[in-house]
Image (spheres, coloured by chain):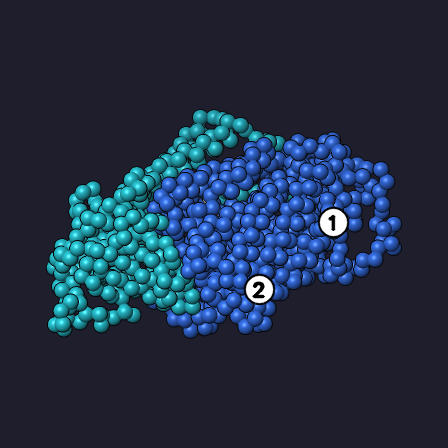
Chain colours: A cyan, B blue
């Protein structure tokens, strides 16, 4: 091959790479991010989107170019060149995808690690230990619900942002056709919406009553199936105040599409207020709208 | 070797002749192939109508077109029909049966009777499945995945009928797989080596290995599931100590290979179509063979990528991420080889080539989203959303169905002796391509932004893109018309094609169109270079004799 061809290939490659990087960086396809692992997710998305754009544009460009340049002209009954293969070339295009997927795999492992997905891989007791040291910022009632050595079957486990905030808010989630019910074991609140304080890790211990459901908050970029008979775990730290949808993502029956709820991320003081006004009165003083809180 | 001519055979045959033979228990692999094709297409129209119901319901955010129960029945039937009654039977049964005996130089499949049985399991199974909507009072409502405990709690009769039907279809698929393996390995014409076979044979060999290894697992799983429903056993019932995640492992142990059962034969068909119309040898034959086998092996160890948000431990999520990502390597090799086949060719831009190239376009897109989905952290957000629906329709429709259309344009002259009309063909192509992309591209955005799959109602913020998607679906429905008109008109009074309109070198073209009962009058040709294009630049005469094709005795 002559030098100019190599040069052109190089130029096209550079243009493609730049185009891919630009698209990955500037085309936003994701909803607003509202948890500490959402920006991590979005970084991964940008990388995958860039690589995907380069590959897609490159391959489709090559395809369209070939179709135009090598189309059969009217009256031409001849054959193309009898090229049956080219081993070095084939080695190159085996190696390139191999390197790309290896890179993507290692990078996404790193992302997963940062999201806390590997917590129980490194330390099998991490999940149980973490559940012991929970405490409440305001209600300061000890968690008593957790059976000590329970097997947790899956989920995103890491509770702390590298030691920044060791205080975890535990919430028990029960999914049933066709609602989520949230129980705060400390203050004993039961609610149909999830209320959480900004910036504090929340640990959901989830179990289903009837069929499989899935707990998904798109703005948190997190999803975990809620399985009957097998508790699962999901930990996240909300980073943006507001209300976000909780969506059931596993077909669970006729009203599956309507099985939605809301997670409300409060400023810490507002969360304290919410806790106070919703904590059931253990004495007979009927203060606050307790368990009448909507279980929709 | 004594060869029977059709004339000698026919008087003794008790089988009906003429068009009636297509409704008979025919043992001729070509008849069976066309039976699969037409039957599959009929189910495709039914499955398409169901898709129309889904897209109509989703044109508005409310559940206002059909009842919620009906909606779940419709989506279950749609998925089951499209997979088990359209794509699997057509890419395997139809094209496999029609072409494989030609390619190995045989007069029929290894087990013609088993072959006919395999086909005749399909219409009753399909009718059974669809009738469950009318007879059992309720069809299955738990999706084509039938996850328990949902499938244990939805109306039992419909679920049982669904299981029966899928068991019959799985049985048919296994019979077919055994037959293909035996034919490719044992029925080759003397002198024909494995590495001289057309690529479609390798694709069918790989596919059939997957069918034979994986389908029995699905059958066993569904039998256990039916016990749970009828006999109240507790295999998958958590209330009786069962485990629902085990079902998912068993189900996907079959159903991930199933996606390759749907697409590997399509890879094979494209490998046949492109060299003929580009007038070039298939690039990198040997690496193509090895990549098919690599896909088969890897395809068996990636199933848990469908369960990243289920009850799976972290090490498992990690292992399946890596295994799944690596499938992209052999798959990529195949695509680069096809591009290299086109490069420097003399490409006829006819309907067969347009559909094949659109397949490359679509599949590359679906493959890229697939590799993204293989990354656990990415998948945790989009699993069970419309992003996944977009991904697999790019693969299954944009891949397999586009190739079925390409193959129809390519082999119709062989089936009937007449060429499909090119203008109608291109109209069909343009409508399908635009409709398809309009329908499925927006679904990726919907999934990323919060729309789960299998819902009858959704957040009104998603209305616009859902409506775009529905318009695309409408276009796809319309695109079927030019195809149907073309097929019917051509069959009646289309342009005669001659025996070999494309000047192809593979053995199915080295006989008359349509071919005689035992494929060749006289001895079967020995084609050792099925892709030997390009060695004689200059004019190519119709039915020219290449020095490498010793099929001269085959022609009267
Ligand atoms: C490049 C190779 C591919 C990769 C890496 C890949 C990866 C994946 C992954 C990870 C999922 C799970 C997504 C989820 O549910 O969250 C998935 C779903 C799916 N893929 Fe692929 N895929 C590839 C090619 C294919 C092919 C060739 C087909 C079929 C011909 C296919 C058909 C499907 C189907 C049908 C589903 C959805 C199944 C369901 O949940 O109903 N994919 N793919
Ligand atoms: Cu649900
Ligand atoms: Cu899969």
Q: Earlier in the sequence, mark 1 or mark 2?
A: 1
Q: Which mark is residue B224?
A: none
- Tell me if B325 is positioned left or right of A271 in this view: right
The residue shown at (27%, 50%) is A148
Placement of A240 over or under A166, stated as above or below: below
Q: Which mark is residue B161?
A: 2
In the structure shown, which secondary structural element does the residue marked by tag 2 occupy?
Answer: helix
Q: Nearer the viewer, residue B285 or B226?
A: B226
Placement of A75 over or under A87, stated as above or below: below
| Image location (x, y in percent) of residue B184 | 68, 40
* Mark 1 CB within 8 Å of ligand 1: no
Q: Quadrant of the N terminus of chain B?
A: top right
* Number of numbered labels in the structure image: 2
The residue shown at (62%, 51%) is B173
- Tell me if A181 is positioned left or right of B189 in this view: left
The residue shown at (24%, 56%) is A145
Contact, mark 1 vs mark 2 (Cβ under 8 Å): no
Which is closer to the viewer, label 1 or label 2? 2
User: Which residue matches tag 1?
Assistant: B112
In the structure shown, which secondary structural element does the residue marked by tag 1 occupy?
Answer: helix
Q: Nearer the viewer, residue B406 or B293?
A: B293
- Label 2 chain ID: B
Disc 2: CA contacts within 10 A as few (<14), some (14-19) or many (>=20): many
| Image location (x, y in percent) of residue B242 | 44, 55
Q: Quadrant of the C terminus of chain B?
A: top right
Disc 1: CA contacts within 10 A as few (<14), some (14-19) or many (>=20): some
| Image location (x, y in percent) of residue A93 | 47, 33
Corner quadrant of residue B222: bottom right
Does residue B505 appear in the picture of this structure? Answer: no
| Image location (x, y in percent) of residue A194 | 24, 61
């Amino acid at each position: 091959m002559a030098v100019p061809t190599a040069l052109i290939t190089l130029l096209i490659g550079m243009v493609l790479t730049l185009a891919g990087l630009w698209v990955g960086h500037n085309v936003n396809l994701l909803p607003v991010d509202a948890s500490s692992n959402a920006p991590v997710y979005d970084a991964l998305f940008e990388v995958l989107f860039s690589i995907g754009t380069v590959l897609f544009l490159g391959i489709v460009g090559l395809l369209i170019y070939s179709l135009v340049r090598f189309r059969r002209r009217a009256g031409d009954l001849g054959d193309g060149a009898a090229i049956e293969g080219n081993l070095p070339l084939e080695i190159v295009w085996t190696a390139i995808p191999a390197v790309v997927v290896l890179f993507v795999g290692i990078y996404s492992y790193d992302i997963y690690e940062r999201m806390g997905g590997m917590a129980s891989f490194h330390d099998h007791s991490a999940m149980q230990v973490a559940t012991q040291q929970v405490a409440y910022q305001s209600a300061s009632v000890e968690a008593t619900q957790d059976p000590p050595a329970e097997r947790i079957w899956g989920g995103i486990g890491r509770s702390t942002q590298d030691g920044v905030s060791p205080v975890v808010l535990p919430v028990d989630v029960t999914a049933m056709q066709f609602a989520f019910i949230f129980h705060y074991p400390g203050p004993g609140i039961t609610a149909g919406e999830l209320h959480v304080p900004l910036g504090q890790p929340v640990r959901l211990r989830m179990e289903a009553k009837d069929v499989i459901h899935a707990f998904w908050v798109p703005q948190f970029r997190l999803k975990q199936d809620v399985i009957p008979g097998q508790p699962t775990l999901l930990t996240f730290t909300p980073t943006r105040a507001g209300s976000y949808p909780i969506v059931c993502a596993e077909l669970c029956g006729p009203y599956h599409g309507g099985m939605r709820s809301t997670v409300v991320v409060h400023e810490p003081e507002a969360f304290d207020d919410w806790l106070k006004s919703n904590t059931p009165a253990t004495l007979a003083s009927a203060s606050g709208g307790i368990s009448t809180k909507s279980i929709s | 070797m004594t060869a029977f001519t059709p004339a000698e055979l026919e008087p003794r045959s008790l089988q009906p002749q003429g068009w009636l033979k297509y409704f008979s228990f025919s043992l001729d692999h070509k008849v069976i192939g066309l039976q699969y094709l037409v039957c599959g297409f009929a189910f495709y129209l039914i499955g398409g109508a169901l898709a129309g119901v889904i897209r109509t319901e989703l044109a508005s955010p409310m559940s206002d077109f059909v009842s919620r129960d009906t909606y779940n029945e419709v989506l279950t039937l749609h998925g089951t029909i499209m997979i088990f009654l359209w794509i699997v039977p057509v890419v395997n049964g139809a094209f496999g049966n029609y072409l494989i005996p030609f390619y190995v130089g045989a007069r029929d499949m290894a087990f013609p009777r088993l072959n006919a049985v395999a086909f005749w399991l399909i219409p009753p199974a399909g009718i059974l499945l669809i009738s469950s909507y009318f007879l059992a009072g309720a069809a299955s409502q738990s999706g084509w995945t039938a996850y328990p405990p949902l499938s244990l709690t939805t109306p039992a009769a419909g679920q049982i009928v669904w299981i029966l039907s899928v068991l019959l279809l799985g049985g048919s698929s296994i019979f077919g797989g055994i037959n293909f393996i035996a034919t490719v390995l044992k029925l080759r014409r003397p002198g024909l080596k494995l590495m001289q076979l057309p690529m479609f044979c390798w694709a069918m060999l790989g596919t059939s290995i997957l069918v034979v290894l994986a389908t029995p697992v699905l059958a066993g799983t569904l039998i256990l599931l039916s016990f749970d429903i009828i006999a109240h056993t507790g295999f998958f019932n958590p209330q009786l100590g069962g485990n629902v995640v085990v079902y998912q492992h068993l189900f996907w142990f079959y159903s991930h290979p199933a996606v390759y059962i749907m697409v590997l034969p399509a890879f094979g068909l494209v490998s046949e179509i492109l060299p003929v119309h580009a007038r070039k040898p298939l690039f990198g034959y040997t690496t193509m063979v090895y990549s098919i086998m690599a896909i088969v092996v890897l395809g068996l160890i990636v199933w848990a990528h469908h369960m990243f948000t289920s009850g799976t431990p972290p090490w498992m999520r990690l292992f399946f991420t890596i295994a799944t990502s690596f499938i992209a390597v052999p798959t990529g090799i195949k695509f680069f080889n096809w591009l290299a086949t086109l490069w420097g060719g003399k490409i006829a831009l006819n309907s067969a080539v347009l559909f094949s190239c659109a397949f490359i376009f679509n599949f590359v897109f679906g493959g890229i989203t697939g590799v993204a989905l293989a990354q656990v952290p990415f998948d945790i957000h989009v699993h069970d959303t419309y992003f996944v629906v977009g991904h697999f329709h790019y693969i299954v429709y944009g891949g397999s169905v586009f190739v079925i259309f390409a193959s129809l344009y390519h082999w119709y002259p062989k089936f009937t002796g007449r060429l499909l009309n090119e203008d109608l063909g291109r109209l069909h192509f343009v409508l399908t391509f635009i409709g398809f992309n309009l329908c499925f591209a927006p679904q990726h955005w919907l999934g990323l932004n919060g729309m789960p799959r299998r819902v009858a109602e959704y957040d009104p913020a998603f209305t616009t893109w859902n409506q775009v998607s529905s318009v695309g679906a409408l276009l796809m429905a319309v695109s079927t018309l030019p195809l149907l008109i073309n097929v019917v008109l051509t069959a009646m009074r289309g342009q005669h094609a001659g025996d070999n309109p494309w000047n192809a070198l593979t053995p199915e073209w080295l006989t008359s169109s349509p071919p005689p009962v035992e494929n060749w009058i006289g001895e079967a040709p020995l084609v050792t270079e099925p892709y030997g294009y390009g060695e004689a630049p200059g004019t190519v005469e119709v039915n020219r004799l290449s020095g490498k094709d010793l099929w001269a005795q085959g022609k009267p």
